[in-house]
Image (cartoon, rainbow, N blue to C red):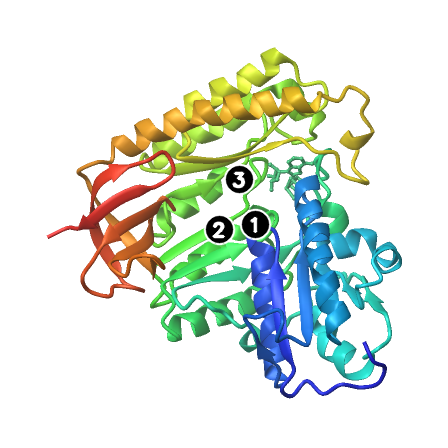
Amino acid sequence: MEKGSQSLKSLKFYIHTFGCQMNENDSERLSGILQAEGAQTSDSLDESDLVIINTCAVREKSEEKFFSYLGRLDSLKKRKNITIGAVGCVAQLYQSQLLEKKPIIDFVLGPDNYHLIPEIIQCHHGDKFISTKWNQKWHEIPQNLTYRENRISAYVTIMEGCNNFCSYCVVPYTRGREKCRPKQNIIQEVKDLAKKGYKEIQLLGQNVNSYKDPETGKEFPSLLKEVNRIEGIEWIRFISSHPKNFTQNIAIAMKEAEKACHQLHLPIQSGSSSVLKRMNRGYTKEEYLEKIVFIRKLMPDMCLSTDIIVGFPGETEGEFQETLSVLKDVGYANIFSFRYSPRSHTKASREKNAIPFKEKRRRLIELQAFQRNIQLDHNRSLINSVIKVLCLGKSKKDSLIYAGRNEGNQVINFKSKKDVIGQFVDIRITSCGPYSLIGEIAP
Ligand code: 5AD
Ligand code: SF4
């Protein structure tokens, strides 16, 4: 890029996001900050002056996707004077190495530095720029600086970072230590979203259940209670929960908050207590299952999902089979499953007893096939029932097909002659697959 200063007015930018909901929400903030300075989003890479890649480092594959995307930008950069920024977790992890190894990148920003983006474009245009500092305290980006494409369901970040140091996980090194957002800022943002007509709020953080208001010391149940009181919002979800921090008080607060969806993503990672110990998860299989029993006694209709890692170093066939047996016992409506991949900085990456790639792949295929049947049985049991669905969009291929989610966060596709986007509708389930439900508007 040419040196000097560049105005943000009329600059066109394109953001490509990899990874989790936190990254999606961060991209919405980046987009809002740039638009507030007069820049415009663009759907086309070719027409953009600035390309920002929001990266994910959680698994090897996520990182590879970023490097291959970067490779695709090579020819564009040769043709055009564009600025390329790498932000997010890979940026935080590799810092200046990224600038040295990938000269195509002009700036690198860690997740706690997004407020700097206008300054980089306006004042450091043409210089290589890097900032990966961490603030100990919450840095509030005014919430009107979040640009949300979705007008129905909104992510609201309540905390960032993680203190857990699970032995396989890079996140504490990319997102830093836990810090919580002041409750009054969260409540203000949700109230504003309610005024704009949002129906669903998803409270976000790496470990939402360890939330503690930095000003009053009030914990997650109190936050949930307050969000529940905000008029206009009808469904509240939160992600991610750590089983260690998911207390009985939180389950009780969920039951008492009538807008809290009876849906919980509670990552178990493995069904073997010995693997869980090596993963440094802070709970045993038995303790996890006791929590599930408590939750289900309180809310029998609770829809559960989880994350599983197969092929953690030293995982025996017996330990893997224990994971399958937990899947059967709990009956999750959905799982996210991954082959273990060693990540830099982590304790597990230094273990010697790696499981061969082929074996990890075999276990993942077996686990997914096993879970597929559980989901199919669960979804079949819903056929003919009428379910409340929040309609979130329309099929791109067929203008009569709409898509939404039920309280359990399952995807439902249904036919409707009327446009019902943004509305709650009663859907009769007519058929299903393992990963989605199909229905029609109930008369
Ligand atoms: N290898 C495989 N999966 C991982 N996850 C986190 N780190 C790794 C890793 N090194 C998975 C966990 C986590 C989800 C977001 O990603 O299951 O819950
Ligand atoms: Fe990673 Fe564990 Fe923290 Fe989740 S709780 S972000 S898996 S270290």
Asked whether disc 3 touches disc 2, contact meaning CB atoms under 8 Å apart, the reply is no
Count of numbered tags: 3
Label 3: which secondary element: loop
Query: What residue sits right under mark 3 in the picture?
Result: 246
| Quarter of image, res 280 | top right
Query: What residue sits right under mark 1 in the picture?
Result: 208
Asked whether disc 1 touches disc 2, contact meaning CB atoms under 8 Å apart, the reply is yes
Quadrant of the picture in which ligand 2 is shown: top right
| Quarter of image, res 95 | bottom right
Kind of residue sitting beneath label 3: Phe
Label 2: which secondary element: strand
Kind of residue sitting beneath label 2: Phe
Q: Quick one: label 1 or label 3, which is nearer the N terminus? A: 1
Determine the CA span between mark 1 and mark 3. Answer: 9 Å
Task: Kindly identify which numbered label has been placed on residue 403.
Answer: none
Q: Nearer the viewer, residue 240 or 294?
A: 240
The reply to whether residue 86 is in sight is no
Residue at the limit of the structure toward the left, as seen here? 443
Look at the picture and state if 110 lies above or below 380: below
**How crowded is the residue under tag 2: few (<14 C-alpha within 10 Å), some, or many (20+)?**
many
Determine the CA span between mark 1 and mark 2. Answer: 7 Å
Q: Residue at image x 72%, y 87%? A: 7
**The N terminus is located in which quarter?**
bottom right
Asked whether disc 1 touches disc 3, contact meaning CB atoms under 8 Å apart, the reply is no
Residue 329, percent across and down?
42, 21
Look at the picture and state if 128 lies above or below 393: below
**How crowded is the residue under tag 1: few (<14 C-alpha within 10 Å), some, or many (20+)?**
many
Judged left or right of residue 209, residue 108 is: right
Determine the CA span between mark 3 and mark 2. Answer: 12 Å
Residue 424, percent across and down?
26, 59
Query: What residue sits right under mark 2 in the picture?
Result: 238
